[in-house]
Amino acid sequence: MPNAKVLEEKKAVVAALTEKLQNSVAGVVVDYTGTSVADDTVLRKELREAGVEYSVVKNTLLTRAIEGTALEGMKEALEGTTALAVSREDYVAAARILGKFAETHEAFKIKTGYLDGAVIDLDTINALAKLPSREVLLATVLSAFQAPMASFARAVQAVVDKNGEAAAE
């Protein structure tokens, strides 16, 4: 039986993991087997820049953190090496970055994930991974709004120019 100090440390880790999961909008669990230190460093930097927290976790501690929650369905995927990537604000950043990384690194596997407190399947994670970034989506929406207004402004200007020519004659 572990001593009281070790037990308290593990309880603190589980509590921190539980809080991290509750305060995030999305997360992805991966198997990082075979990832080199150099590749891992590049991956961590990209995730950090996108506002995604990425850390290696023990399966038993993550299992305890999800017990009794809606994320308990992830338990079956918690085997082998496990890393957890969570995002507090961006729904697709973790899936997009890890999905792109998994395409170029054969041993790196996405195990499972969650979105808004519900477990999602690999197909959903792959669909999220293919979405463009939030900034690109916003730019696309703004350009869709801007196009009709710009056309209207050009039409009004053409009428003004035509009327100006008619008055000059």
Image (cartoon, rainbow, N blue to C red):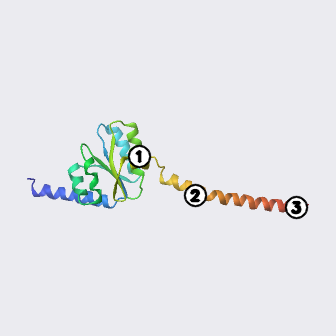
Name the amino acid type tagged 1.
Asn
Kind of element beneath mark 3: helix
Judge by depth and name the residue closer to the eye, 76 or 155: 76
Q: Any mark on residue 126, and which?
A: 1
Residue 20 visible in image: no
Q: Which mark is residue 166?
A: 3
In the rendered view, would you say 118 is above or below 31? below
Mark 3 vs 2: CB contact within 8 A: no
In the image, residue 64 lies at what x, y percent?
21, 56
Give whichever of discs 3 and 1 has the lower sequence position: 1
Category of crowding for the residue at label 1, using alpha-carbon neighbours closer than 10 angstroms: few (below 14), some (14–19), many (at least 20) = some
In the displayed structure, would residue 35 be above or below residue 118? above
Residue holding disc 2: 142
Kindly state the secondary structure of the residue where label 1 is placed: helix
Q: For this rendering, which residue is in front, 51 or 155?
A: 155
Instruction: Please state, as top left, top right, bottom left or bottom right, where the C terminus lies in the image.
Output: bottom right
Residue 116 coordinates in the image, percent (x, y): 37, 59
